[in-house]
Structures are given as structure tokens and as C-alpha cells.
Image (tube, grey):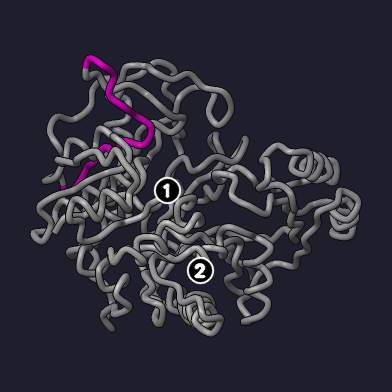
């Protein structure tokens, strides 16, 4: 098979690494020249992905990021007769509009926080006051994971409303969603979906705040653990029954069947799991430890999801735990430098690495072939261990050996009690 991967971050490198291990795959292409994907033999797709897929005999397209899904890439691929893993634009509205997702959850009975949506500052400020000030303020549209402010005070919430409606996120902030602030540990549960069934993956927990102890601004994700020690199979089944399968059923009833991967960001409240958000793609960095934990060929699963025919059985997973620590450029998630040489990277393609993989998130090769930084999140050091302590120790043993100017990371990924 020839598989084309759309996207070039840490999530896409993790998917490419897992796909490259499949005996069914003889060729990989990528729309972004991620050095980690290129090391796996990835060929650069330098034209429109649909044109490339048609002209180069692509058998499956795996779409990583949300933006091309929302823009209808899967619709175009399907119209051209190319199998694609990912939802259509209509189904991707679950992530494209937080207001749509909340209306949908209320309609089908999926538990979520109280909310309201506003396109005027007056209405949004009134909603903040009605919730007592401590609330969550969200840009309605796609904001690269940075359009959410968890406000502890009314002043903070009102400031977030003004920033979002004032144009900080462009069209994504034309509307703002005001939510009740829920309490409890967060959890990510993803499921492969074929339009009819939701097949859960292992649960994961990411750490979005920039600094240790869950402090500082939200980021795209500073690390993740899979599976968390406090989450058992009974809870995952409850999420499947009350969140994931109802979402798949509800989208099918609307005539927009959901195929691909559905990500439920959850708060484990005293009243049970409640949905904070839906994403329509693998989480980043949750995807990285998930790929280390998966203990079967992913390619037949991706093909089956795209074809609407997932197996009716649990997936196969390794015992143990995987931990991902994200290394970032100084200044992230604000202004940060680029083009800094990265040293200490493992040699080869890491295809045969089972217990430790350094995933490239924001890197590129310069004209001399040197790997340099190209984004805020630079590397995802992902390790497996028989338990969390071993996985953490292995990841943090490797992190300091990877060097670039201003490199920074959190030191508490996976520590008990660390939620943010």
C-alpha cells in the first residue's frame, strides 16, 4: 500500500512511525517535510493532496490536523475515489464550531457543562456575570488549541471575552462560548469510528498548561500519559456508552456519518464524565503514547474505519504505560525563536524502536541537511515502561540529551495529582 499522510507535526510523525511498521505498507508520502517522517522513507507530496493521490497511486490518505478536515479535504478525496481516514467537512463541525458541538450534545443527551453562545460583547459579559465570574471562555472556531481561557475571576473572564471578540483569533473568534467551570480531573478518550460504531482507544491524559504544577497559559500540549493509573476499563466503557456511541449515532441520524477518530475531552466530575470538547482527529501529544501502546497493525483499522467496517472486538494493547514529554522553544506559546540547530537526535528512522521514540513536532532540515527548529513544540520524547515510574524515568533520561538553544520542558508530566 501507498499511504499519504497530511500534516507534519508530532502527531503525524507518530502515525507515520506506526504505519511504517505495517507489512502492508511499501510507500509513505507526506505533505510536510517533517524530518522524522522523511527518515521513514517518506516522499514529499509537493502538490495538492488530491492531485498527488490520484497521480501517484495512493491507496489511503490519513489526515492528521483539523484544518484540512474542516475545509473538506476528505470530501474531495472521496469524490476522486481515494479512501481517506477522517471525517467529512459536515462531520468535522463537531470541532469546527464549539457552539454547534454544544447544541449537538444537548440534542442527543451527551453530558456537558451549562453554556451559552454570543456574538456581542454585551451578551457575553452578561453570561459571565450570570455564572459568577469563574467560568470558561472559548472562541467558537478553530484556534490551534489556544482559544480557551479557564478564568478564575470575573475580571479574567471579561478580559478574555474582549480579546476573543476583539479579533485575537480572527474569524474563529466571531462568536464566543461561555461555559460553566467544571471541577475534577481531565481525561481524553478517543475512538475509531466507522459511521456506525465507536471503538475506544486507551484513555490518555495530557498536560496543557505551560509550566509545572498546571500553571501558566494553555498550550497545544506539554506532554501526555497513556493510560492514567486512575482510569479503568469500566470508566472507558461508560464514556463509550454515554458519550462516544451517542455522538456517532447522532451524527448518523443527521445524515453526516462520522468516520475517522473522535476525541472526547472530558472532565471527571462528581456527577460522572462530562464533555469539555470534541476534536475530530488524534490529539497531539496524546497520539504519541497511544501509538507506542498499540499492539497491532494500525493500517487495517484505518482502512476499515474509512470503509465503514471496523471489527467488532477490542483493540490489542501492550501492558504497561507510555509517557510523552514535549520539548518546546523558549517563549512558547508566545513569541519564540526558530531555526535553532537540534543536536543529539537518534540515528536512523526509529522504525524498530519499541520503548523509546523521539517524535519530531516542529522541526525541518535546513539547506545543509541540519535539523533545526521550526515551531514552538519541537520534539515529543515518548517512552514505554512496565509502569508509569519506569516510563517517566526513561523519557526524562533522554530529554536532556536533546539540545537546542532555549529548549524547555515540564518536569512533572505524569506525576500523581498533576492535572493541568
Query: What segment is highlighted magenta in the picture?
Result: 354-368
Magenta residue check for 226: no
Q: Is residue 111 above or below residue 215?
A: below
For label 1, the SS is loop
Q: Is residue 163 above or below residue 58?
A: above
Quadrant hosting residue 404: top left
Say which residue appears at 28% left-offset and 48% top-offset. Answer: 14
Say which residue appears at 56% left-offset and 63% top-offset. Answer: 93
Horizontally, residue 322 falls left or right of residue 152, namely left
Dot placed on the residue nearer the N-terminal end, 1 or 2? 2
Of the pair 193 and 382, the residue shown nearer to us: 193
Residue identified by numbered label 1: 284
Q: CA distance from mark 1 to mark 2?
A: 20 Å
Mark linked to residue 91 = 2
Q: Residues within 10 Å of mark 1 (few under 14, many from 20)?
A: many
Horizontally, residue 377 falls left or right of residue 183, namely left
Say which residue appears at 79% left-offset and 45% top-offset. Answer: 161
Front of the two marks 1 and 2:
2
Q: Is residue 395 visible?
A: no
Magenta residue check for 356: yes
Q: Is residue 240 visible?
A: yes
Horizontally, residue 162 falls left or right of residue 368, namely right
Of the pair 382 and 302, the residue shown nearer to us: 302
Amino acid at each position: 500500500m501507498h499511504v499519504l499522510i497530511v500534516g507534519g507535526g508530532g502527531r503525524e510523525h507518530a502515525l507515520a512511525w506506526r504505519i511504517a511498521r505495517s507489512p502492508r505498507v511499501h510507500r509513505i508520502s507526506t505533505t510536510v517535510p517533517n524530518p522524522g517522517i522523511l527518515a521513514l522513507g517518506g516522499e514529499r507530496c509537493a502538490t495538492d493532496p488530491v492531485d498527488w493521490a490520484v497521480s501517484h497511486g495512493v491507496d489511503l490518505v490519513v489526515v492528521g490536523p483539523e484544518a484540512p478536515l474542516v475545509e473538506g479535504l476528505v470530501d474531495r478525496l472521496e469524490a476522486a475515489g481515494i479512501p481517506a481516514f477522517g471525517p467529512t467537512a459536515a462531520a468535522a463541525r463537531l470541532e469546527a464550531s464549539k457552539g454547534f458541538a454544544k447544541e449537538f450534545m444537548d440534542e442527543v443527551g451527551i453530558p456537558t457543562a451549562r453554556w451559552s453562545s454570543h456574538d456581542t460583547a454585551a451578551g457575553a459579559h452578561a453570561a459571565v456575570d450570570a455564572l459568577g465570574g469563574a467560568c470558561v471562555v472559548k472562541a467558537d472556531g478553530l484556534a490551534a488549541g489556544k482559544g480557551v481561557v479557564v478564568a478564575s475571576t470575573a475580571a479574567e473572564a471579561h478580559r478574555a471575552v474582549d480579546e476573543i471578540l476583539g479579533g485575537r483569533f480572527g474569524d474563529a473568534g466571531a462568536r464566543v462560548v461561555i461555559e460553566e467551570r467544571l471541577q475534577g480531573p481531565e481525561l481524553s478518550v478517543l475512538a475509531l469510528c466507522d459511521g456506525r460504531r465507536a471503538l475506544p482507544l486507551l484513555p490518555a491524559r495530557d498536560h496543557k498548561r505551560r509550566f509545572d504544577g498546571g500553571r501558566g497559559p494553555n498550550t497545544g500540549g506539554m506532554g501526555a500519559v497513556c493510560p492514567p493509573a486512575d482510569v479503568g476499563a469500566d470508566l472507558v466503557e461508560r464514556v463509550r456508552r454515554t458519550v462516544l456511541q451517542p455522538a456517532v449515532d447522532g451524527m448518523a441520524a443527521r445524515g453526516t456519518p462520522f468516520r475517522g477518530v473522535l476525541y472526547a475531552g472530558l472532565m471527571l466530575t462528581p456527577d460522572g464524565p462530562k464533555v469539555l470538547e470534541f476534536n475530530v482527529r488524534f490529539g497531539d501529544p496524546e497520539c504519541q503514547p497511544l501509538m507506542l501502546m498499540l499492539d497491532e497493525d494500525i493500517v487495517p483499522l484505518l482502512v476499515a474505519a474509512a470503509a465503514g467496517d471496523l471489527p467488532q472486538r477490542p483493540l490489542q494493547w501492550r501492558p504497561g504505560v507510555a509517557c510523552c514529554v514535549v520539548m518546546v522553544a523558549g517563549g512558547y506559546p508566545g513569541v519564540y525563536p526558530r531555526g535553532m540547530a537540534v543536536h543529539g537526535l537518534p540515528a536512523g528512522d526509529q522504525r524498530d524502536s519499541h520503548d523509546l521514540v523521539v517524535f519530531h513536532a516542529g522541526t525541518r532540515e535546513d539547506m545543509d541537511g541540519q535539523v533545526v527548529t521550526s515551531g514552538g513544540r519541537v520534539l515529543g520524547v515518548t517512552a514505554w515502561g512496565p509502569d508509569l515510574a519506569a516510563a517517566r524515568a526513561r523519557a526524562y533520561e533522554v530529554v536532556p540529551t536533546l539540545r537546542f538553544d532555549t529548549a524547555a520542558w515540564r518536569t512533572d508530566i505524569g506525576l500523581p495529582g498533576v492535572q493541568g
